[in-house]
Image (cartoon, coloured by chain):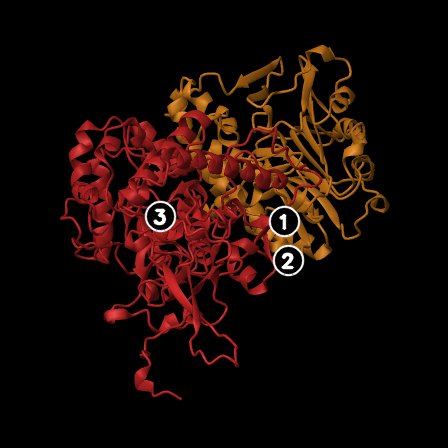
Amino acid sequence: MCRLALKTASEAFSPYEVLQGMEAMQEGYDGSGLGLLLRGLEFEDFKYNSKFPILSGIAHTEESWHRLNKFMENRGFELRYDHEFETRPEMIEATDRYRYFLRAYKLPASLSAKSKDEIETELMLTRLALRKDGEDHGNDLTAFSFWPDVATIKEVGWPLEIGDALHLFDNRIKSRVCMAQGRQNTNYGINLYACHPFFIQGIATMTNGENTAFVPIRDWLLGKHFPGYTGYQSDSETFAHILHYTLKKLKLPLQAYKHIITPLRGDELAIHPQGDFLRGLRDSCRRLIIDGPNAIIGTLPDETCMLVMDQKKLRPATVGGRPGVWAIASEMCGVDAMVPDRDPSLDFQPMREHTILVLPERKELTIWSQHDPYPLGQAA
Amino acid sequence: MVSTRSLSIGPGSLSYTDLPWIIQHREDRCTLCGHCTAVCPKEAIYLAYRRQRMPKLDILSKKRNNEYRTFVGIRQKKNMENSCIGCSMCSMVCPNEAIEPVPNTNENRTLFFNNQKGEPAKRGGRRNEVGPTLLDRIMFNRISMLTDPALDAGRHEFHITTTLGRTLDPEVFLKRTRDGGWIPPTREIFPFVIGSMSFGALSPNMWLGLLQGVAYCNEVLGIPVVMCTGEGGCPPWVLKSPYLKYIILQIASGYFGWDEIIRAIPDMQCDPAAIEIKYGQGAKPGDGGLLMWFKVSQLIARLRGVPEGVDLPSPPVHQTLYSIEESVMKMIQTLSTAFGHKVPIYPKISASTSAKSVLNNLVRNPYAGGLLIDGIDGGTGAAYNVSMDATGHPIASNVRECYLDLVKQGKQNEIPIFAAGGIGKNGNVTQNGLALIMLGASGVHIGKYIMQAAAGCLGNEKNRCNVCNVGICPKGITSQNPKLYRRLDPDQVAERVAHIFMSISTEMKKIMAPLGRSQSLPVGMSDALGIADKDAADRLNIKYVC
């Protein structure tokens, strides 16, 4: 079973802190993968403009590295910053790692003049094209994300060792939000793309447990024929895509996510003030009902962090912290490790109806219940 | 050697060993009470007096005479009209276990004579194919073992209902909600539906028992079971009762019973669960419904608006059609309008290689609320043997390819596919039903299983009984003869219905729990299925396991 850790703080911090938090939960992963996703980035050697999209991934060969450069040039992206990891390759299990890359680009002028939607589509298509290019060349290029203010690192191995191998302790990269997942390989193969967090157009989620309703949900998402709904090396990727579908395609408020993945029962809807609408939403999104056990931890482009559970709540995650610093982890000891100087009695474990948010101000937890009135005005 | 002319043997003469069922009677146990001969629906047995010569070996006597003894016993008639159907009512009523029918292991020659007076054989019931079905052979093998532990079927909260009716694509749903547009009606129902068996095919007591049982399931047990009427309408008191919401009204090509239904609309207290438009039936595809004259009693004649004692064959197709596509569209739209667009309307078709084209037609019809596909193993009240035996299409691959077609279009949540035909044929009703659900059906209809399990229908795949067509059902399930249907106590049927659905509901949980599923019906969860048959696995796109 995977272990999840998220830390969000007003002051940027090193991702290594989160890896140390992961260490506290080490019984729960088997070294089959680590994923890190950072938002609110600060680089020691570059004043980063958070509008520049950052391309994250791994070039497995020199040839793919050149192809990548050429591809980005051809599309008109202008390289502004290329973060060079100091690596200790001997600490990495895999041998085909030519270069880890985090590179900030300036948008081509032709693109920056376009609408927000068009830019977002182009960024996604660029990432997908790079991914496809890698797949067409024997998986020699892996592209995780291409988005402003988002950096992703994924590697197979033990979290802390990967952190050491990539010198993440040296404070050259810091961020205000860091998501980390230590993977326990389950039914699906060891694959870099199977590492969480999953990312699509600014939305990222990571999950523990397994989504037993994976195949019907995947089939339905594939049927939408949206280019970004692809991959599915892990059943958990569907959670990110459902969140994306809720916010970007249906343009519903964040409250709707929980109503879609774990709708209320018929008798609960009967007494809900917006029961009719929510029943209709449940029916039309029925194929997106998840069947955990899962804790889903997500982050949004404005640095909002969220935590929801599946209905069965067999994987209770914990959120805790203090104003300015909050942590969400699949295990309590993970929260302890990330924010030791907090009042643990104020920690919160969400029930099946809750959505927990840490808003960008990071002052307090926001707790929504599905039984609360639903903001219908925004939906209809 | 005697001359042949002195023997009363003709081309159609049969002996006991030519009949499908042979009555075995033990004279040493028989009390001559006459119960068996009175109860036999075929009058296949009779009380006979026999004389037996008792040879006397007294060679020294000059007296030349024999002694005779007489005795009585039960004998079997050997003509086609009265040949035993194996229903075993005689054994059931015998106080001394003196009589029973046994299946003839010889090839029975009646097969060559079942076209008496030029009329091909007809029967009710089933296809008569023994052995495990393909559905029986499907295993659920994606067992949750590690990251997702198996659930506790007894303690977890399970959501095992399904949606009947069209659901909109989420984006369309939101747009219509914003604009105040029409949201098609849906019903949240138990995924095992009592399939369409008409008031006419079934006896009044059977029908009442089913309805009582369904109402009990809904109102006391909280299991939202619905039942379909079949063609032939519905008693007016039911149409005007609050129980109508548990009933799917069927309209078929004879439109029998619809005068009463249309007249009752203003007085309806609630809407029916749905309207099923029958275009075809799995047991006899391309054939209309058939209620033979034996069963058109005064009550049935009144409900259907026809004279008593006439055959009621429905035409194979709806007669108002100009083209079939237009007919489907118009009927669905008209019926939707008749019920104020508040009742899901869906067609029922025979499983067929052309099912996909019907489905795609419905996908584009905004008023269509689903599709029911009925496979070759479905049952019927009456059909020609040749239709039942040789025409049709098995349900599993038909449902699967229709579902996968919807998946390709991203429409699998919009038009629910219901499957029927042979579910629970060998008793494995929940296993069969959930296998079809995981192949892509949103629910299943069960007919024969209900008759067997709820009312003790005696039919089986060895052509036992199967005389539903001629109104002599010995259990009173499919007869309109009060002497017969009074044998069936509606309260007991209702009790059995409740037992059946309680048990299916528990078994569903026992199947879903190890798969780690509890929050929604696992429609299309084909990764959970396996079969030890490579060809079937390839065809159904599921795992081959051995």
Quarter in which the C terminus of chain A is drawn: top left
Rendered red, the chain in question is B
Q: Nearer the viewer, residue B52 or A326?
A: B52
Q: Amino acid at mark 1?
A: Asn
In the drawing, what numbered circle is on residue B545?
A: 2
Residue ID for mark 1: B141
Q: Nearer the viewer, residue B449 or B46?
A: B46
Residue B68 position within the rendered picture, expressed as x and y whole percent measured from the top left: 43, 69
Quarter in which the N terminus of chain A is drawn: top right
Query: Does residue B72 lie above or below B268 as drawn?
Result: below
Q: Are marks 1 and 2 in contact (CB under 8 Å)?
A: yes
Crowd class of label 1 (few under 14; some 14 to 19; many from 20; radius 10 Å):
some
Is B526 on the left or on the right of A380, as rendered?
Answer: right
Separation of disc 1 and disc 3 at Cα? 28 Å
Residue ID for mark 3: B371
Is A99 on the left or on the right of A53, as rendered?
Answer: right
